[in-house]
Amino acid sequence: DIQMTQSPSSLSASVGDRVTITCRASQGISNFLAWYQQKPGKVPKLLIYAASTLQSGVPSRFSGSGSGTDFTLTITSLQPEDVATYYCQKYNSAPWTFGQGTKVEIK
Amino acid sequence: EAQLVESGGGLVQPGGSLRLSCAASGFTFRSYSMNWVRQAPGKGLEWVSYISSTSSAISYIDSVKGRFTISRDNAKDSLYLQMNSLKAEDTAVYYCARDRCVSTSCGLDIWGQGTMVTVSS
Protein backbone atom coordinates (compact mmCIF):
# COMPACT_ATOMS: atom_id res chain seq x y z
CA ASP A 1 0.00 0.00 0.00
CA ILE A 2 1.04 3.57 -0.64
CA GLN A 3 2.09 5.47 2.49
CA MET A 4 1.41 9.17 2.99
CA THR A 5 3.93 11.11 5.10
CA GLN A 6 3.32 14.66 6.23
CA SER A 7 5.89 17.12 7.51
CA PRO A 8 6.24 18.72 9.87
CA SER A 9 4.12 16.93 12.48
CA SER A 10 3.50 20.27 14.14
CA LEU A 11 4.40 23.90 13.68
CA SER A 12 3.96 27.19 15.44
CA ALA A 13 3.76 30.41 13.43
CA SER A 14 2.70 34.00 13.90
CA VAL A 15 -0.47 35.57 12.59
CA GLY A 16 0.19 36.73 9.04
CA ASP A 17 2.96 34.22 8.41
CA ARG A 18 3.12 32.03 5.33
CA VAL A 19 2.75 28.38 6.35
CA THR A 20 3.65 25.38 4.20
CA ILE A 21 2.80 21.75 4.94
CA THR A 22 4.24 18.94 2.88
CA CYS A 23 2.71 15.56 2.04
CA ARG A 24 4.78 12.87 0.35
CA ALA A 25 3.42 9.68 -1.20
CA SER A 26 5.57 6.55 -1.26
CA GLN A 27 4.53 6.03 -4.91
CA GLY A 28 3.15 8.34 -7.55
CA ILE A 29 -0.52 9.21 -7.21
CA SER A 30 -0.84 11.78 -10.02
CA ASN A 31 -3.02 14.55 -8.57
CA PHE A 32 -5.40 12.28 -6.63
CA LEU A 33 -4.90 14.13 -3.36
CA ALA A 34 -7.16 15.99 -0.95
CA TRP A 35 -6.42 18.21 2.04
CA TYR A 36 -8.62 18.48 5.13
CA GLN A 37 -8.74 20.80 8.12
CA GLN A 38 -9.88 19.56 11.52
CA LYS A 39 -10.29 22.21 14.20
CA PRO A 40 -10.13 21.06 17.84
CA GLY A 41 -13.26 19.14 18.76
CA LYS A 42 -14.74 19.55 15.30
CA VAL A 43 -15.46 17.45 12.25
CA PRO A 44 -12.93 17.37 9.37
CA LYS A 45 -13.54 19.80 6.53
CA LEU A 46 -12.49 19.38 2.91
CA LEU A 47 -10.20 22.21 1.81
CA ILE A 48 -8.69 21.08 -1.47
CA TYR A 49 -9.17 18.21 -3.91
CA ALA A 50 -7.35 17.16 -7.06
CA ALA A 51 -4.22 18.49 -5.35
CA SER A 52 -4.94 22.13 -6.15
CA THR A 53 -8.68 22.76 -6.55
CA LEU A 54 -10.15 24.83 -3.74
CA GLN A 55 -13.39 23.48 -2.32
CA SER A 56 -16.29 25.92 -2.50
CA GLY A 57 -16.35 28.35 0.42
CA VAL A 58 -12.74 27.84 1.46
CA PRO A 59 -10.78 31.09 1.89
CA SER A 60 -8.37 31.91 -0.91
CA ARG A 61 -5.42 32.09 1.50
CA PHE A 62 -5.40 28.28 1.26
CA SER A 63 -3.78 26.73 -1.79
CA GLY A 64 -2.46 23.35 -2.84
CA SER A 65 0.12 22.23 -5.33
CA GLY A 66 2.03 19.18 -6.47
CA SER A 67 1.70 16.04 -8.50
CA GLY A 68 3.16 12.57 -8.44
CA THR A 69 4.70 12.08 -5.01
CA ASP A 70 5.19 15.54 -3.52
CA PHE A 71 2.41 17.90 -2.50
CA THR A 72 2.11 21.08 -0.47
CA LEU A 73 -0.64 22.93 1.34
CA THR A 74 0.08 26.63 1.78
CA ILE A 75 -1.64 29.18 3.98
CA THR A 76 -0.46 32.53 2.64
CA SER A 77 -1.37 34.58 5.73
CA LEU A 78 -2.05 32.54 8.86
CA GLN A 79 -5.15 33.60 10.80
CA PRO A 80 -6.16 32.68 14.38
CA GLU A 81 -9.08 30.62 13.03
CA ASP A 82 -6.63 28.44 11.09
CA VAL A 83 -5.48 26.70 14.29
CA ALA A 84 -6.20 23.09 13.41
CA THR A 85 -4.73 19.78 12.37
CA TYR A 86 -4.36 19.36 8.62
CA TYR A 87 -4.46 16.00 6.85
CA CYS A 88 -3.69 14.94 3.32
CA GLN A 89 -5.47 11.94 1.78
CA LYS A 90 -4.73 10.06 -1.36
CA TYR A 91 -7.54 8.60 -3.47
CA ASN A 92 -5.97 7.19 -6.62
CA SER A 93 -6.78 3.67 -5.45
CA ALA A 94 -7.90 1.93 -2.27
CA PRO A 95 -6.99 2.22 0.52
CA TRP A 96 -7.69 5.97 0.57
CA THR A 97 -4.92 6.60 3.11
CA PHE A 98 -4.61 9.75 5.21
CA GLY A 99 -1.35 11.32 6.28
CA GLN A 100 -0.63 11.39 10.00
CA GLY A 101 -1.59 15.05 10.32
CA THR A 102 0.14 18.39 10.90
CA LYS A 103 -0.90 20.44 13.91
CA VAL A 104 -0.77 24.19 13.33
CA GLU A 105 -0.64 26.56 16.29
CA ILE A 106 -0.26 30.30 16.72
CA LYS A 107 3.02 31.52 18.20
CA GLU B 1 -28.52 21.71 3.55
CA ALA B 2 -26.72 18.40 3.15
CA GLN B 3 -26.49 16.53 6.42
CA LEU B 4 -25.29 13.18 7.72
CA VAL B 5 -26.28 11.80 11.12
CA GLU B 6 -24.61 8.69 12.53
CA SER B 7 -26.05 6.41 15.19
CA GLY B 8 -25.46 2.99 16.69
CA GLY B 9 -22.22 3.53 18.58
CA GLY B 10 -21.68 2.41 22.14
CA LEU B 11 -19.73 0.18 24.50
CA VAL B 12 -19.19 -3.40 23.37
CA GLN B 13 -17.03 -6.24 24.66
CA PRO B 14 -14.15 -7.60 22.59
CA GLY B 15 -15.50 -10.08 20.08
CA GLY B 16 -18.88 -8.38 20.02
CA SER B 17 -20.80 -6.71 17.22
CA LEU B 18 -22.30 -3.33 16.45
CA ARG B 19 -24.17 -1.90 13.50
CA LEU B 20 -23.61 1.75 12.70
CA SER B 21 -26.12 3.73 10.68
CA CYS B 22 -25.82 7.02 8.85
CA ALA B 23 -28.93 8.91 7.79
CA ALA B 24 -28.54 11.33 4.91
CA SER B 25 -30.68 14.34 4.13
CA GLY B 26 -30.58 17.48 2.01
CA PHE B 27 -29.05 15.83 -1.08
CA THR B 28 -29.69 13.00 -3.54
CA PHE B 29 -28.10 10.17 -1.58
CA ARG B 30 -28.23 7.64 -4.42
CA SER B 31 -25.98 9.88 -6.55
CA TYR B 32 -22.95 9.78 -4.26
CA SER B 33 -20.37 7.30 -3.08
CA MET B 34 -20.01 7.08 0.69
CA ASN B 35 -17.27 6.29 3.18
CA TRP B 36 -16.64 5.44 6.81
CA VAL B 37 -13.65 7.12 8.46
CA ARG B 38 -12.59 6.60 12.07
CA GLN B 39 -10.49 8.48 14.57
CA ALA B 40 -9.14 6.82 17.69
CA PRO B 41 -8.97 9.05 20.79
CA GLY B 42 -6.21 11.62 20.34
CA LYS B 43 -5.14 10.11 17.02
CA GLY B 44 -5.39 10.93 13.34
CA LEU B 45 -7.96 10.07 10.71
CA GLU B 46 -8.13 6.54 9.33
CA TRP B 47 -10.21 5.67 6.26
CA VAL B 48 -12.15 2.44 6.92
CA SER B 49 -14.46 1.63 4.02
CA TYR B 50 -15.96 2.90 0.77
CA ILE B 51 -19.10 2.06 -1.19
CA SER B 52 -20.04 3.43 -4.60
CA SER B 53 -23.43 4.93 -5.34
CA THR B 54 -24.89 1.67 -6.66
CA SER B 55 -22.95 -0.59 -4.26
CA SER B 56 -21.07 -2.03 -7.24
CA ALA B 57 -17.68 -1.08 -5.78
CA ILE B 58 -16.72 -1.68 -2.15
CA SER B 59 -13.33 -1.35 -0.43
CA TYR B 60 -11.99 -1.83 3.09
CA ILE B 61 -8.81 -1.12 4.95
CA ASP B 62 -6.93 -4.39 5.52
CA SER B 63 -7.38 -4.31 9.30
CA VAL B 64 -11.18 -4.67 9.04
CA LYS B 65 -11.51 -6.99 6.04
CA GLY B 66 -13.58 -10.03 6.92
CA ARG B 67 -14.95 -8.34 10.06
CA PHE B 68 -16.72 -5.19 8.81
CA THR B 69 -19.36 -4.95 6.09
CA ILE B 70 -20.43 -1.69 4.49
CA SER B 71 -23.83 -1.41 2.85
CA ARG B 72 -26.38 1.16 1.83
CA ASP B 73 -30.10 1.46 1.20
CA ASN B 74 -30.72 4.17 -1.37
CA ALA B 75 -34.48 3.94 -0.84
CA LYS B 76 -33.94 4.87 2.81
CA ASP B 77 -31.09 7.36 2.24
CA SER B 78 -29.00 5.36 4.66
CA LEU B 79 -25.48 3.98 4.98
CA TYR B 80 -24.50 1.17 7.32
CA LEU B 81 -21.41 -0.44 8.80
CA GLN B 82 -21.80 -3.88 10.33
CA MET B 83 -18.88 -4.47 12.66
CA ASN B 84 -18.22 -8.00 13.93
CA SER B 85 -15.41 -9.56 15.98
CA LEU B 86 -14.60 -6.16 17.43
CA LYS B 87 -11.18 -5.53 18.92
CA ALA B 88 -9.89 -2.93 21.35
CA GLU B 89 -8.07 -1.24 18.47
CA ASP B 90 -11.41 -0.56 16.78
CA THR B 91 -12.20 1.95 19.53
CA ALA B 92 -12.75 5.28 17.79
CA VAL B 93 -15.19 7.91 16.66
CA TYR B 94 -16.70 6.66 13.42
CA TYR B 95 -17.64 9.27 10.83
CA CYS B 96 -19.73 8.74 7.76
CA ALA B 97 -18.60 10.97 4.92
CA ARG B 98 -19.98 11.74 1.49
CA ASP B 99 -17.68 11.41 -1.47
CA ARG B 100 -17.67 14.05 -4.14
CA CYS B 101 -17.82 11.37 -6.83
CA VAL B 102 -20.33 8.75 -7.96
CA SER B 103 -18.27 5.67 -8.80
CA THR B 104 -14.87 6.35 -7.27
CA SER B 105 -13.42 8.39 -4.44
CA CYS B 106 -12.32 11.98 -5.03
CA GLY B 107 -12.55 13.84 -1.74
CA LEU B 108 -14.94 13.72 1.21
CA ASP B 109 -17.02 16.89 1.24
CA ILE B 110 -19.77 16.25 3.81
CA TRP B 111 -19.11 14.65 7.21
CA GLY B 112 -21.39 13.56 9.99
CA GLN B 113 -20.76 14.44 13.62
CA GLY B 114 -19.52 10.94 14.39
CA THR B 115 -20.54 8.13 16.70
CA MET B 116 -18.25 6.72 19.39
CA VAL B 117 -17.47 3.03 19.47
CA THR B 118 -15.70 1.72 22.57
CA VAL B 119 -14.50 -1.87 22.65
CA SER B 120 -13.64 -2.85 26.20
CA SER B 121 -14.37 -5.55 28.77
Image: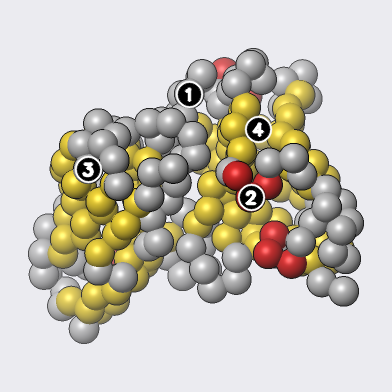
Chain of the residue displaying label 3? A
Question: Is there one chain holding both mark 1 and mark 4?
Answer: yes
Q: Identify the amino acid type marked 4.
A: Ser
User: Do the residues under discs 2 and 3 have CB atoms within 8 angstroms?
Assistant: no
- Kindly identify the amino acid type of the residue bearing the numbered disc 3: Thr
Q: Which residue is mark 3?
A: A69
Question: Residue A2 in the image: x percent, y percent?
Answer: 38, 44
In this figure, which residue is indicated by the disc labeled 1?
A: B104
User: As drawn, which residue projects farthest toward the bottom?
Assistant: A107
The answer to whether dots 2 and 3 both sit on one chain is no
Residue B25: mark: 4
Of the residues tagged 3 and 4, which is closer to the observer? 3
Give the CA distance from mark 2 to mark 4.
30 Å
Q: Quadrant of the N terminus of chain B?
A: top right
Q: Nearer the viewer, mark 2 or mark 4?
A: 2
Q: Earlier in the sequence, mark 1 or mark 2?
A: 2
Q: Residue at x 54, y 73 (%)?
A: B42
* Helix, strand or loop at mark 4: strand
Alpha carbon distance from label 3 to label 4 = 37 Å
Question: Label 2, on which residue?
Answer: B63
Given the image, on which type of amino acid does mark 2 rest?
Ser
- Do circles 3 and 1 both sit on a common chain? no
B63 vs A82, left or right, is right
Instruction: For the residues labelled 1 and 2, say whether their Cβ atoms are less than 8 Å apart.
Output: no
User: Callout 3: helix, strand or loop?
Assistant: loop
